[in-house]
Image (tube, rainbow, N blue to C red):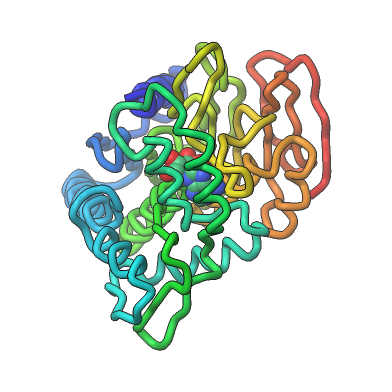
Amino acid sequence: MKRSLAGIAILAVVAGLLYYAAGRREVELHQREFFVMGTLVSITIADTDRATALRAMEAAEEDFRYMDRTWNPWKPSALRRINQLLASTEWFSVAPSVEPLIRDSMELYERSGGLFNPAVGGLVALWGFNRDEPPTTPPPREAIGDLVARAPSMADIEFDGIRIRSRNAAVQLDFGAFAKGRAVRIVTDLLLEMGIRNAIVNAGGDLRAIGRRGDRPWRIAIRRPSGEGYLAVLETRGDESIFTSGDYERWFEYQGRRYHHILDPRTGYPAEGVSSVTVVHGDAGLADAAATALFVAGPEKWPETARAMGVEQVMVVGSDGTVYMTPAMAERIRFEEEPPRVVIRSP
Ligand code: AMP
Ligand code: MG
């Protein structure tokens, strides 16, 4: 539930920014909102006739719902069946609706140095972050240690044509860090194919924007990790995706400590030192995966991971409020209020 509320909060901000000063050319916007992948998705289309926009938004929603059903490891789905078969360590034919996600995740896993690791589904389930309601207590230390020792990783997966197997029975796929980005990419590609040139596909604050909003760029608000309102604003250029991973999306408190949903595969515990990571990139799927990987990399090591994953525009908000940025991000971001400490680091 926390995640959806955060989504609504940022959408409200974005929507507020969409209605802009009088005196400029009026832009006709078409908008559709629906709840999918545990978040509120909003599609906004500009400079398109009503009939085309409505057709496109309907098709987009249908595709989103299909991907949600297919890629959800915790409900009856193609992915859940794949997880059952991976646990057998035997060869089997992989569903074509999931295959590209697995292949691309294997590459992103390598590039992230193992920090983006969708094979940690077992760990996600152990923590209870796979349920609608957040958990209330951390799992036993021994159970976490046992699973980390079995080291499930994307490198355990082998392909032979369309057949696949895992050498490690502990591998359970959870694309929570990647599927939303991939879905946003696919749905925006669909809009482009239907002739739409100016639009935003926004999944709870993570989005891809194409074209412009009439005579000016789309303006995107980035949520403040702690507290209300937004931290900064970006104006998009052409075709860009902006994805944020934050410790405020799914979390619980136990005995005075906060535990969130982004897990460090090396320790089995929530990654420490960072509150949020925002990545801007041309590929929404890569932006999504990289935001998660950089979060796990932490406030010191994130530039190395950014370089390895090929992302140049990054903003990291440390747990102490320090804002770290790459030069390419610093050059374009506008803060609502100057952060207490800013550190510029090249990837
Ligand atoms: P995101 O909000 O994109 O950072 O994705 C977080 C979600 O991805 C979590 O809710 C888990 O389902 C999953 N996840 C957690 N830790 C990792 C990790 N290190 N690598 C890949 N997926 C993860
Ligand atoms: Mg992610």
Q: Residue at x 37, y 35 (%)?
A: 128
Q: Is residue 209 visible?
A: no
Q: Residue at x 69, y 44 (%)?
A: 297
Residue situated furthest bottom in the rendering: 161
For the N terminus, the quadrant is: top left
Q: Residue at x 31, y 75 (%)?
A: 94
Query: 31 or 49, which is in the foreground?
Result: 31
Q: Is residue 197 left or right of residue 217?
A: left
Q: Position of residue 166 (x, y in %)?
A: 43, 72
Q: Position of residue 269 (x, y in %)?
A: 57, 37
Q: Position of residue 36 (x, y in %)?
A: 26, 41
Q: Quadrant of residue 230?
A: top right
Q: How many marks?
A: 0
Vertical side of 9 occupied by 180: above or below: below
Vertical side of 123 occupied by 91: above or below: below
Q: Position of residue 195 (x, y in %)?
A: 32, 60
Q: Is residue 326 visible?
A: yes
Query: 122 or 304, which is in the foreground?
Result: 122
Query: 109 or 51, which is in the foreground?
Result: 109
Vertical side of 22 occupied by 291: above or below: below
Query: 27 or 58, which is in the foreground?
Result: 58
Q: Is residue 27 left or right of residue 120?
A: left
Q: Residue at x 26, y 37 (%)?
A: 30
Vertical side of 54 occupied by 164: above or below: below
Q: Quadrant of residue 233?
A: top right
Residue situated furthest front in the rendering: 142
